[in-house]
Image (cartoon, rainbow, N blue to C red):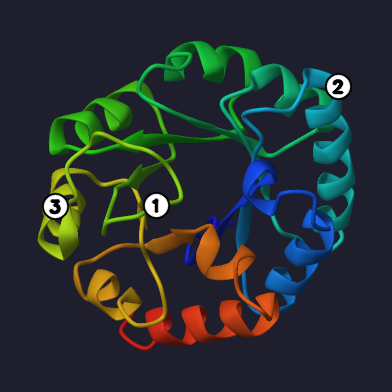
Amino acid sequence: MATDYSLYLVADADYAAGRDLAGLVDAAVAGGVTIVQLRAKNLTGGAFVELGLALAGRLAERGIPLLINDRLDVALACGAAGVHLGQEDVPVPLARRILGPDATIGVSVNTPEEARRAERQGADYVGAGPAFATTTKDSPLAVLGPDGIRIIVQATRLPVVAIGGIGAGNAAELARAGAGGIAVVSAILGAPDARKAAEDLKKAFMRYL
């Protein structure tokens, strides 16, 4: 069964800043999130695994894949569905060898060539961004805009998940550009009502698919 990337939540433990991240994820899934990536740049390995295990169990009951940002060891320890890798992280072929053929492996890209390389190396999808300007994650990369996302979509056969600065007001532009999904952090985790925020995002994006 193909993975549904349409509404991709990056559950950033640092952005949650002590709030109940698992509760926010539960609400977001109830609102239509289809896949979750756990990102925790500043947690110790043990704390990262503990959080991953808590989320993995809750999400498995709902049939929602959990991916781990960067850390193959954490993904293995908590039985996650796979990992999401940056350009400077472990190469895709090595990650595949460690995690196995059934793991879902995504790669962050900013250019068509990076997308083509991810495809050649065996990635399952690419996360293309920043789609729009964002303050959630510091990045020196060029903002792609819908036209840049479209160029990356045309460069690869992999599903392209757009990320960066996305909200209900601009999600449709990315659907029209051919993105297979949208990934968000603050649009859900920073919303007063995570479930409603997810519902609004899903409705805005899916209307044009």
Q: How far apart are the alpha carbons under marks 3 and 2?
A: 40 Å
Q: Report x, y in % for residue 68.
A: 64, 35
Dot 3 or dot 2: first in sequence order is 2
Q: Amino acid at mark 3?
A: Gln
Q: Report x, y in % for residue 41.
A: 62, 29
Residue 59 in which image quadrant: bottom right
Q: Taking 188 as reference, is 13 left or right?
A: right
Of 168 and 58, which appears nearest the observer? Answer: 168
Q: Which residue is mark 2?
A: 46
Of 140 and 35, which appears nearest the observer? Answer: 140
Q: Is residue 123 visible?
A: yes
Q: Which residue is mark 3?
A: 154
Identified at 76% across, 73% down, the residue is 27
Secondary structure of residue under mark 1: loop
Neighbor class of circle 2 (other Cα within 10 Å; few <14, some 14-19, many 20+) is few
**Quadrant where the C terminus lies?**
bottom left
Dot 3 or dot 1: first in sequence order is 1
Q: How far apart are the alpha carbons under marks 3 and 1?
A: 27 Å
